Amino acid sequence: MTAKSAAAAARSTVHGYPRQGRGRELKKAIEGYWKGRVDADALRTTAAELRRTNWQHLTEAGIHEVPTGDFSYYDHVLDTSVMVGAIPARHRAAVELDALDGYFAMARGTQDVAPLEMTKWFDTNYHYLVPELGPDTVFTADSTKQVSELKEALALGLTARPVLVGPVTYLLLAKPAPGVAADFEPLTLLDRLLPVYAEVLADLRAAGAEWVQLDEPALVQDRTPAELNAAMRAYRDLGGLTDRPQILVASYFDRLGEALHVLAKAPVEGLALDFTEAAAANLDDLAAVGGLPGKRLVAGVVNGRNVWVNDLTKSLATLGTLLGLAERVDVAASCSLLHVPLDAAAERDIEPQILRWLAFARQKTAEIVTLAKGLAQGTDTIAAELAANRADLASRAGSALTSDPAVRARAAAVTDVDARRSRPYDERTAAQRAHLGLPPLPTTTIGSFPQTAELRTARADLRARRVDTAGYEERIRAEIQEVISFQEKTGLDVLVHGEPERNDMVQYFAEQLTGYLATQHGWVQSYGTRYVRPPILAGDISRPEPMTVRWTTYAQSLTGRPVKGMLTGPVTMLAWSFVRDDQPLGDTARQVALALRDEVDDLEAAGTSVIQVDEPALRETLPLRAADREAYLAWATEAFRLTTAGVRPETQIHTHMCYAEFGDIVQAIDDLDADVISLEAARSHMQVARELAEHGYPREAGPGVYDIHSPRVPSADETAALLRKGLEAIPAERLWVNPDCGLKTRGWPETRASLENLVAAARTVRAELAGS
């Protein structure tokens, strides 16, 4: 096919779409099911309606081929575990008794059975459920979900493409099951898994699938020769099947690099590549391997992870270059649109001049359709769209919102001294212990307490002016009093005010900083039914006035025990926002750090002796390629130190991280120079404590002993057992006792019981240490 005929054949598609619905109907239905207010049939009906609505919108917008199988009740990796029969032994009885309840038990756990571990999906803020595999794992195909959803779409008369997690990525995401040797490599199960994928492909072919997409984002990371060989074998074998649909292997989030050579030669019919941001290197790499003669190329030229309008002219130029490199070039987003909100048109509080800069899932869909039309029919057919796009880009580039000379001058004046504490850790810790007078194994929480329906209603009433500010603040004061009283009675050593006034750990601060935009309906899935509204970082950042001092000071006035000041760190403020794409991330991080430094200084001046600056996103923002990591960690750790370095030696700086693989960043954790770090550890059975010990981490640490993402209440004995395991890696004088994460998503009954058990466990182990 010539470049001209390839252009004429260009079609539009997407890899996936937001699942929740315009009003988060899926969240409400699932949580209603958990609480017994919605039955299984009603939940399934809601899910089917959402799928149909998504497909119809995509088709009406002009998308030629819709995805199926991307919809999930909780997580698409968990769906894959079900598809291949990788059900942990502890959950098999529940799954056999009721497939839906067993599915949710794997995701959330029960009082008697722990859930699957949860961690971040590559460098996004989406969380997936980690498959648990071992040498005895037996895979069995169950394509029920994939086939039924395909048939739903085909029954509507749509061209549909099932989307599955690919076998290599699935195994590379997996971990050894409990009781399996830690050095077991799940990838050794590939030959056992491929026949199951073959069976699923045959089932989808029989159901009417012409194409099936197999997602292999793990191949954009640095991979060993053995792993690349596994990818070669996987797609040699799957491509060699006779009873299968055509196969599209998809990658995203970065360049394929060495894996492109493997997949370009594989006997599959198509590849999907990311041509945005750093992944533009895919263009050079694709040319270097001689293109994809005879194959379909799905070109991800619209950024599926950020919210800024696409530069249509630039994307058309990229697409034009690609025409000579494949038999057929189709247009898509760089990845699933799961990672962006649904519709910018729903926003009523953003100025129209700024709103025109934004593209959520629906707007990105329109961009994809426009680009496909321009590629297939010529730019004259989209002249109006191109003119409007150029005006939108010029409006943003020339806006006063994007540049504040005072902020830029302050950031430029920063020196190395500004990011260093005045005393080394050994001197600081002695001063802090004398000042705080804490017992061995001090107990604390991560920050937030349950966000009850009453608190959410109070905030909604304030926004709607059903209550005045005085009435709202009285409600907040009462909640803080209750939280402080409970913590004192329970026996916690370092208290928190509970954050009742905060809607989200990033949004709350973003709403008080210049340069940020907040949305009303910009919900994005974080995990399961947990949705967040990431703010939009549109301009230079500064802090007009204190943000947390008032409520922290009030909480401290209610108790003689230390109350932590609670802030979100600069890297997390970036990672959990939609960031600027018009300046380096390190420059933006420095601006945010300086704004937060002002807050830290004000907290200390108000008498706060313990200040926690959370950085749960430090690991997830780590570049996927090792060659890019040193530069990132340099500015990321500097930003944290710049935030915290101005305090006195006796002021104790904490940080917190959760739900990520920490082994790759232990040195960076050390470089933060925090006095205390708390980390997720309950689901991974204290793995992070061992990693810290192997590194020789010299500071205090609190590996979590209570998994807050599950409704189950761990007993005091279970908590004590985890604490003893932590002591095997971290000496008692440096070990803290805390949950994995904040308690915002939990209810008060389980919170009370779990924290009472946590304190009891700490007392038990303290007594054991004293008697030893």
Image (cartoon, rainbow, N blue to C red):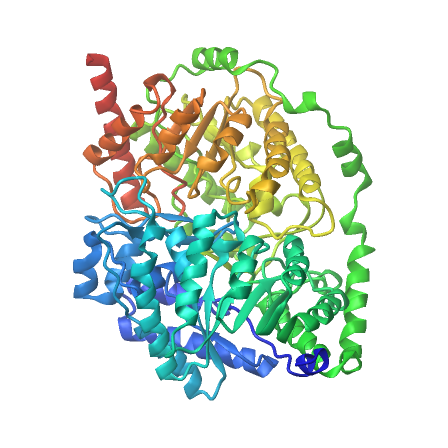
Residue at point 81% right, 72% down? 387
Where residue 650 appears, as percent x and y from the top left, is 52, 15
Quadrant of res 768: top left
Would residue 525 be found to the left or right of residue 12 on screen?
A: left
In this rendering, would 62 be left or right of 54? right
Residue at (73% x, 24% y) in the render: 415
Q: Nearer the viewer, residue 570 or 211?
A: 211
Rendering quarter of residue 522: bottom right
Residue 211 drawn at (x, y percent): 47, 77
State whether residue 609 is above or below residue 511: above
Instruction: State the image quarter where residue 184 is shown.
Output: top left
Q: Name which residue lies at 35% across and 59% down.
A: 78
x, y percent for residue 651: 53, 19
39 vs 473, nearest the viewer: 39
Query: Vertical placement of 379 versus 614: above or below?
Result: below
Q: Residue at x 78, y 73 (%)?
A: 386
Q: Quadrant of the C terminus?
A: top left
Quarter holding the N terminus is bottom right
Task: Mark yes or no: residue 227 visible.
Answer: yes
